[in-house]
Image (cartoon, rainbow, N blue to C red):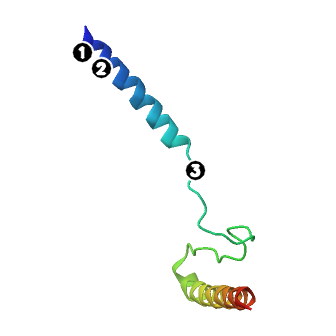
Amino acid sequence: MRLIILLIALMIVGLLVTTNLSKRTQPSTESSTEPPNSGVPKIPVNPQDVQQFEKDMNAFIENKTSKQAKEIDRATQ
């Protein structure tokens, strides 16, 4: 009898844990005040769009690093 109650309790706990994990959203790693997808280049679907995506991604990274460098300079002054 104890074994059956223990198994039922474990099943209930397992059910609660899985439902809690499925509802949990991942926290954003962005600590910026900007929306997370502002200005991010779209991932290409067609192979011929990869060249343009590379250019867009490089420009985005350069823009983001320059903004971060400015924020660091302002914070350290």
SS category of the residue bearing label 2: helix
- Callout 3 secondary element: loop
Image x and y of residue 21, in percent: 49, 42
State the residue at coordinates (25%, 7%).
Answer: 1
Total number of numbered labels? 3
Viewed as shown, does residue 1 lie left or right of 9?
left
- Res. 3 mark: 1
**Quick one: 47 or 73, which is closer to the camera?**
73
The residue positioned farthest toward the top in the image shown: 1
Residue 65 appears left or right of 74:
left
User: In the image, which disc is placed on residue 25?
Assistant: 3
Residue at 68% across / 87% down in the picture?
A: 72
CA–CA distance in space, label 2 to label 1: 6 Å
Asked where in the image residue 75 lies, by quadrant, the reply is bottom right
Q: Is residue 16 above or below residue 62?
A: above
Q: Nearer the viewer, residue 19 or 71?
A: 71
Disc number at residue 29?
none
> Do the CB atoms of the residues marked 2 and 1 lie less than 8 Å apart?
yes
**What x and y, as percent, mark residue 64?**
66, 85
Kind of residue sitting beneath label 1:
Leu
Residue that badge 2 annotates = 7
Q: Residues within 10 Å of mark 2 (few under 14, many from 20)?
A: few
Badge 1 local density, few (<14 within 10 Å), some, or many (20+)?
Answer: few
Quadrant position of residue 46: bottom right
Q: Residue, x 43% and y 29% (percent of image)? A: 15
Residue 50 picture quarter: bottom right
Q: Which three-letter amino acid code belongs to the residue tagged 2?
A: Leu
